[in-house]
Image (cartoon, helix red, strand yellow):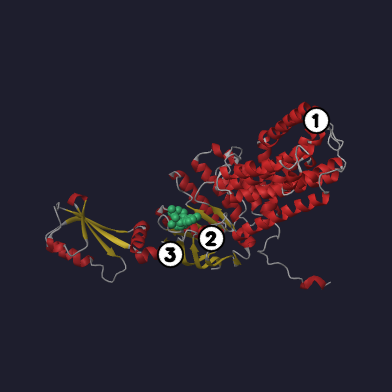
Amino acid sequence: MTIHSNVTKPPPTQPVRFNRHGVWAIYKFEMARALRTLWQSFLAPVISTALYFVVFGSAIGSRMEAIDGTSYGSYIVPGLIMLSVLTQSVSNGSFSIFMPQFSGTIYELLSAPISAFEAVLAYVGAAATKSVVLGLIILGTASLIVPVEIQHPLWMLGFLVLTSVAFSLFGFILGIWGQTFEQLQFVPSLILTPLTFLGGSFYSIDMLPPFWRTVTLFNPVLYLISGFRWSFFGTSDLGVGWSLLMTSLFLLVCLAIVSWMFKTGYRLRS
Amino acid sequence: MPTALSISNLNKVYDGGLQALTDVSLEIRKGEIFALLGPNGAGKTTLISAVCGIVSPTSGSIKVNGNDAAKNFRAARAAIGLVPQEISTDMFEPVQSTVAFSRGLFGRAPDPKHIEKVLRQTALWEKRKDRIMTLSGGMKRRVMIAKALAHEPEILFLDEPTAGVDVELRRSMWDVVRELRRSGVTIILTTHYIEEAEEMADRIGVISNGKLIVVEDKTTLMQKLGRKRLSLQLQEHLEQLPGELETWPLELAGDGWELHYDFDANAEDSGVPALLNKISGLGISFKDLNTSQSSLEEIFVGLVNKN
Ligand SMILES: Nc1ncnc2c1ncn2[C@@H]1O[C@H](COP(=O)(O)OP(=O)(O)OP(=O)(O)O)[C@@H](O)[C@H]1O
Ligand SMILES: [Mg+2]
C-alpha cells in the first residue's frame, strides 16, 4: 500500500510539463486564420494548379510522349502538388511567426509558459496541416482533369506530411530570420521556385544531358519530387531510400537551427 | 509579508551596448500595489520585460513565488499577467476569442464563465463579438487588460495602463485594479500620472537611468521627502522682495499679492516662526496664511533632478 508513497510529487506551484492548452490555442488560432482567408489559403493555389494541368497536362501534354509508361498529364501530377506544397509550406510557416513580430503580438508568446518545442509544434503543425490539406485538394482537382493512380497511398501521404513539416519548419526559420517582407519573399521566389522547377517537376532527369543531370543531383528538391512520384507510379529517377534520407536530413537540419534560435533567443528576445 | 517577486542584482545591457538596468534589486510583497515611476527611457519597461521573459537579462536573478524565472519558467510565467505599454493584438480577431486565446496560451483549460467575468469587469461584454480593429483606443487598451487577466494571474504588470484613457475610464480602471487587489492579486504598475500612484500605490519605486533610486512606502516617502509650502496672502501688493528677505527661500507670486515659503516638514527648525517675526518686523502684513504638503509629483521631480 505504501509502495508509491515515496514517489516525489512535483511542488504544487509547478504546472504541467506540457502546455497542451497553449499548443492547442495557437494551433486553433492559426487554423481559424486560414479559414478566414479561405480564398488565399486554398482557392488561389488550387486555381493556379488547375491552370498548369490545363496548359501542360491537356494542351501541351497531348502532344508529348509518355514517360516511363505514364501519360505526360499524369506524370506531372506529383511534381505540381509538390510545387504548391513547398511554396505554401514556406510561406505559411514564415508568416505565422513573422506577423507576430511585425505587429508586436509576439510579446504574449514570449511571456507565456510555453517552451520553444511547444511553440514550434503548434505553429509548424498548423502550417503543415494547411499544406497537407492543400496537397490533397490539388490531388483531387488533378484527378478531375487527368487520370491519376496511386500505387503506394500510405507512402504518398507519408512523403506529403514529411515534406509539409520540413518546409513549414524551414519557413518558420525564415520568418524569424527575416526582418522585412522583401526578405520573406526573397528566398521563396529566388531559391525555392527555381529549385522546384529544376527539380524535375515537369520532366524526368533522365531527359537531361549527362552534365546537367549531375548538376541536378545537388538539388535537394529533386529527391522530394522523385520520392513522391515513386509513391504514385512505382518508378522514379532515384531510389526511394535516397528521397526519404534527404528529406529527413533536411528536417533534422531545420530542427537543429530552430532549437538553436530559441535557445539563444535569436532575433526573438532582445 | 510573503514575497511575490524577488529581483536581485539585475543588469541589462542591450545589444547596442546601452545599459538599461544597473544592479536593480527589488522585493515585491504579495498583495501589494507597487508603482514604478521614472522618466521616459528610465528602464521601467525593460525591468518588466525582463521579469516576464521578453527581454533576457544580462545578469542577476528573478524569482516569482520562489520559482527562478529562467530555470523554472513555466511556474514563473504562469503566475504573471502582463499588460504591455503598446497596444498590440490581432486586430482582425473578435474580442472574446482573443481573450480566450490568451487563457489557453498560458496553459489554462477553457472557462467561458471566467472569460465572461473578465469581459464584464473591463466593460467589454457588449463588444465581445466585435473585431478589435473596430474598437476605440480606450477599448483596445481594456482588451489588453482582459487578455492579461484571462488566465487568473497572481501577479499583474500594468505598463502605463491609463495612457491615452479618458478621466472616467481611468477611474473605472482604478476600480478594477482595486478589486483585483482585494481578490489577492499583486499589482505592479508604471505610470506618468503621478496622482495615479498617489491614489493607488502602497509602495513606490523610482527608477532613473536604469538605477532604482528609491523604494519606499508611499506615506513614508511623502513624509520623508515631503516639502511644505507656507503661503501668505498679503494686505498690500509688493513690487519686489525687500532686500532684507533675500537670504530666505521666498518667492513672490500672485502678481505680488502672495508670498511662498518652501520648507522641510521634518526639519527640527522649519524657520516659520523666525520668518513670520522678520516679516512683521519689516511691516509687511498679511490677511491669511496656509500651508500645503507637496505632491508626489513634486517629490518625484526633485528626486530625478538630484540624480
Ligand atoms: N530593444 C531595445 N534595444 C535597445 N535599446 C532599448 C531597447 N528597448 C529599450 N531600449 C533602451 O533602453 C532604455 C530604457 O527603455 P525602457 O523602454 O525600459 O524605458 P521606460 O522607462 O519604459 O520609458 P517610457 O516611460 O518612455 O516607457 C532606453 O534608453 C531605450 O532606448
Ligand atoms: Mg516604458
Chain letter of the residue carrying label 3: B
Residue type highlighted by circle 2: Ala
The chain letter for the residue carrying disc 2 is B
B296 is higher (above) or lower (below) than B169: below
The mark total stands at 3
A133 and A260: which is toward the camera:
A260
- Tag 3–tag 1 contact (CB < 8 Å): no
Q: Which residue is mark 1?
A: A64
Which quadrant of the figure has residue B37?
bottom left
Disc 2 within 8 angstroms of ligand 1 (CB): no
Residue in view at x 62 percent, y 49 percent: A174
Q: Quadrant of the C terminus of chain B?
A: bottom left
Task: Determine which quarter of the picture holds residue A230.
Answer: top right
Q: Mark 3 or mark 2: which comes first in sequence?
A: 2
Residue placed under numbered mark 2 in the picture: B50
Query: Decide: marks 3, 2 in contact (CB < 8 A)?
Result: no
**In this view, A140 is above or below A252:** above
Q: Residues within 10 Å of mark 1 (few under 14, many from 20)?
A: some
Q: Is residue B110 visible?
A: no
Query: Looking at the picture, which amino acid does disc 1 mark?
Result: Met
Q: Position of residue A13 (x, y in %)?
A: 65, 64
* A237 horizontally vs A37: left or right: right
